[in-house]
Amino acid sequence: MIIRRCLCDRDGTSVSLKVLWLTSSFPTHPENGKNLYLWHPLEALKKLGVTPVVLNMQPWKPIIKHSIDRAQFSIDIKNHYYFSIPRHYFRSISNYFYLFKTVRVIKKLNKLHHFDVIHAHGEIAGLAAVKISKQLNIPAVVTIHGIDMCKRVWSGFSGKQFEKMFNRVGKIIYVGESLKKYFQNKLDGDTNFCVLHNGFRMPSSQQLEKRVFENKKTIHLISVSNLHEGKGVDLTLRALICLKNQGIDNWFYTIIGDGDQKNYLEGIIAQFDLSKQVRLIGACLHEIVYEHLQKSDVFCLPSYREAFGIAYVEAMAQGLLTIGVKGQGPQAFIEHGKTGLLIEPQNTDDLVQALHLAITQFQNMKEVAYAGQQYVLENFTWETHAEKLFTIYEEICT
């Protein structure tokens, strides 16, 4: 049950909390699988009495391939563009143009809406949030969703800008413990941050029931991920090759996703003649992903660069036995041997052992999978996330 919440004015009158949601990657459609973690919390916050306005600031490109279908969202969305040099070259110049354009737009929007909180998503959005927070005396929050590994972002004047932002913002939210550890050396103290994990949303048409573990001849494995280095899909393929060489071949592996490693993965599949046991089907709409999850038994994604991992939580909510990596985001909800399985990062031998257990002892793992399902259903919905986020807003507004 969702309890509607609101702030109180000085005279005790209830007022709606007005939040500016500042991002550069808002999803184009509420059912499109990409970047939905920026939309679902807003849905839940609205039910708590929050009035959100989204400002989506995108780098200008000669050809705009995707535009936001604003009619499909039940909130006010403003989309603007700024000049940016690709691949983070001369990052400080791009930062200048971003700040120049974004600050002007926010000032105009604030005259209409009188925001109580500015919530920025990502480091560059944080730059604008901190600057406008000081000018307009509006508290600012910055959520860090991942790590940009490009050294040009953190070098020179640009790096100093971002470090200053980390230490001047009202509150930093990390979506995973690994992010907190990575960025702690950029903070002068440890009082202005917290960890708030993302949530998940199940399709409204689905009923979540305890999965029936039948004696199966073939175990269906699945990964859902962007196909980039660090996600570990290639490690899963190599671990399955090892098992096949050991005579354990009663498995079928579905890979959902797209990215720069697609051709590399297709090469592994062809080289080891896995086409009859591995299916790489590309990116899918959210609803289609859930259909594949319902037909699967084990979710395996040995990603060693994972801030949180919504895909794991969605799989666990469906009752799949789930395999993740120690020290990464999934450790927030996977306790090895109790709610799922954890392996050492980039350790193929460890992964082989985990998959061997999942495939050959599948019937015995049902209680682990069920415990994982119950844990995420009780702790990782977007409604739970929104309640905690509202509490953060209350704290910085008082």
Image (cartoon, grey):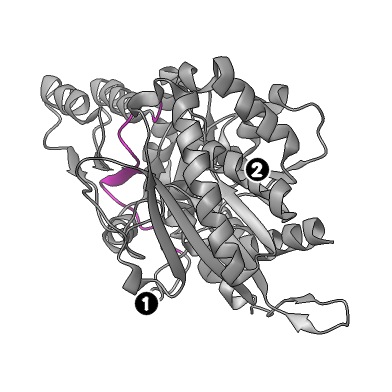
For the C terminus, which image quadrant?
Answer: bottom right
Could you tell me residue 189's position as x and y percent?
82, 30
Q: Nearer the viewer, mark 2 or mark 1?
A: 2
Could you tell me residue 199's position as x and y percent?
55, 57
Residue bearing mark 1:
205
Could you tell me residue 296's position as x and y percent?
32, 52
* Amino acid beneath label 1: Ser
Residue 83 found in image quarter: top left
Q: Looking at the picture, tell me which residue is in the foreground, 72 or 214.
A: 72
User: Which element is circle 2 on?
Assistant: helix
Q: Residues within 10 Å of mark 2 (few under 14, many from 20)?
A: some
Above or below, comparing residue 313 to residue 69 in the picture: above
Residue 180 left/right relative to 68 = right
Query: Residue drawn 33% across and 74% down?
Result: 71
Query: Residue drawn 43% across and 20% down?
Result: 90
Residue bearing mark 2:
131
Could you tell me residue 227's position as x and y percent?
30, 34
